[in-house]
Image (tube, rainbow, N blue to C red):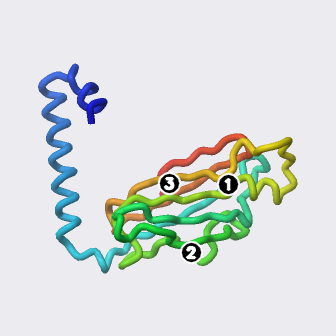
Amino acid sequence: VLSALEGRLGQTVEQEFAQAVMQVHKIAWMRLLAAIDTSDAEGFLTCHVLDTANGCPAQKMRIHLHRLSPPEDAGLVAEYITNDDGRLEGGPALKGGKEMTIGTYEFTFFVADYFASKGTFFPGTPFLDEVPIRFGIDNPDEHYHVPLLASPWSFSTYRGS
């Protein structure tokens, strides 16, 4: 909170007003979502993993999905193995309705195990082992896509479409 406040100290009155209005909209959105029934939501969560070291989809990579919040719903959602295209076998990780709930989630990608299965030599402890990607879902009617581009030494992600 203090670092956010420090970042705002040098703002002009107009910049501060715009940021305050944006925060009021965010609070209103959160209150609205808490007050409405989202059990008929149509959003979904997908994932795609690309092996950038070998230039191919990451076939047979193990992935876990955890829900971190809200606390009463926290825990392991599911475990997956990617298909031949590097996508989750069986389709979306979350599919609308009661599955696609507002909260914080985390995919854990077992990158070292995947590259070891491909014959990548590690002269000791792998540089990347398990790669966690933590993200939030705040609109259960939207499509959230979490791609991972990975090599034994680097990874990148973004909110895809």
Q: Amino acid at mark 1?
A: Leu
Quarter of the image for residue 35 reads: bottom left
Are there few (<14), some (14-19), or many (20+) residues within 10 Å of tag 3?
few
Q: Residue at x 26, y 25 (%)?
A: 6
Answer with left or right where residue 19 lies relative to residue 39.
left
| Residue highlighted by disc 3 | 160
Answer with left or right where residue 93 lies relative to residue 49.
left
| Residue highlighted by disc 1 | 50
**1 and 3 marks in contact (CB < 8 Å):** no
Q: Calculate the distance from the C-alpha at mark 1 to the C-alpha at mark 2.
A: 17 Å
Instruction: Say which mark, if any, is on residue 65.
Output: none
Q: Secondary structure at mark 1?
A: strand
Answer with left or right where residue 153 lies relative to residue 144.
right
Q: Calculate the distance from the C-alpha at mark 3 to the C-alpha at mark 2.
A: 16 Å
Q: Secondary structure at mark 3?
A: loop
Quarter of the image for residue 70 reads: bottom left
Q: Position of residue 87 (x, y in %)?
A: 63, 66
Q: Nearer the viewer, residue 100 or 106?
A: 106
Q: Residue at x 18, y 64 (%)?
A: 32
Q: Amino acid at mark 2?
A: Gly
| Residue highlighted by disc 2 | 91
Earlier along the polypeptide chain: callout 3 or callout 2?
2
Where 115 falls versus 72 (above or below)?
above
Earlier along the polypeptide chain: callout 1 or callout 2?
1
Q: Secondary structure at mark 2?
A: loop
Q: Residue at x 33, y 75 (%)?
A: 41
**1 and 2 marks in contact (CB < 8 Å):** no
Q: Calculate the distance from the C-alpha at mark 1 to the C-alpha at mark 3.
A: 13 Å
Q: Position of residue 114 (x, y in %)?
A: 75, 58
Q: Nearer the viewer, residue 38 or 4?
A: 4
